[in-house]
Image: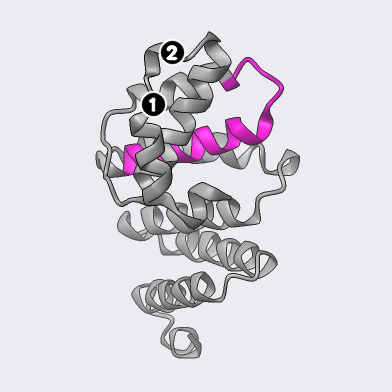
Amino acid sequence: SYIEESPDSALNVLQGMDKGELSGMEEKAKYALLMSIALDKNWVDVTDETLINEAVDYYSNSDDIESLFKAYFYQGRIYVNAHDYPQAVLSYIKAEELLGSVNDNYTAGMLYRELGNIYLHQYDYEKSIKAYEKAYSYYSLAELELHKAHVIMHLGLAYWNNEDFEKAEEY
């Protein structure tokens, strides 16, 4: 998608829009979701969930499960940016509950990578390892070699921190 391939251009387009001209809740929710994604893709660490919550609120009451999945994921990213890890995990779990209804291996991989990072940060190495293994599986399905390499590095670190040195060396 355009936002994935050219996040800086997508952000410029979205910032150039007059939000007051958006008509209806659906357009406002789509804008909120796309703006949240574009900011994240441009390494802008948003810590205020107000914008993404517009998308979460709207898509929670719609049939657009794919957008709700992404809204929960990016809500979780914002909570991570704010160092509110318990809220981030709650958002990620809500996104995880929707995985059976979406076909987005890339975002699913990112979801589990983020959960793995949080669990690693909390010294819960077993959960971290499980999450990273799931991230690896989804990145494999999406054929994202660089993402798989990053997850392998994190898996090695999680095994090392869990004092499973033999397994850590495998990674």
Residue at the top extreme of this rendering = 24
Label 1 sits on a secondary structure element that is: loop
Examine the rendering and report whether any part of residue 164 can be seen: yes
Q: Residue 21 carries which label?
A: 2
Total labels drawn: 2
What residue sits 59% from the left and 22% below the top?
59
What residue sits 46% from the left and 52% below the top?
115
Q: Spatial distance from mark 1 to mark 2, Cα to Cα?
A: 8 Å
Under mark 2, the amino acid is Glu
**Where on the picture, by quarter, is residue 84?**
top left
**Where on the picture, by quarter, is residue 94?**
top right
Residue 137 x %, y %: 64, 66
For the magenta stretch, what is the residue range?
59-80
As rendered, which of 73 and 169 lies closer to the eye?
A: 73
Mark 1 residue crowding within 10 angstroms, few (<14) / some (14–19) / many (20+): few
As rendered, which of 73 and 6 lies closer to the eye?
A: 6
Residue 141 is one of the magenta-drawn residues: no
Under mark 1, the amino acid is Met
Q: Examine the rendered structure and indicate whether residue 122 appears above or below residue 21.
A: below
Examine the rendering and report whether any part of residue 75 can be seen: no
User: Pointer 1 and pointer 2: residues touching (CB < 8 Å)?
Assistant: yes
Q: Name the residue under label 1.
A: 17
Applied colour scheme: one colour
What residue sits 30% from the left and 51% below the top?
43
Residue 95 x %, y %: 57, 38
Mark 2 residue crowding within 10 angstroms, few (<14) / some (14–19) / many (20+): few
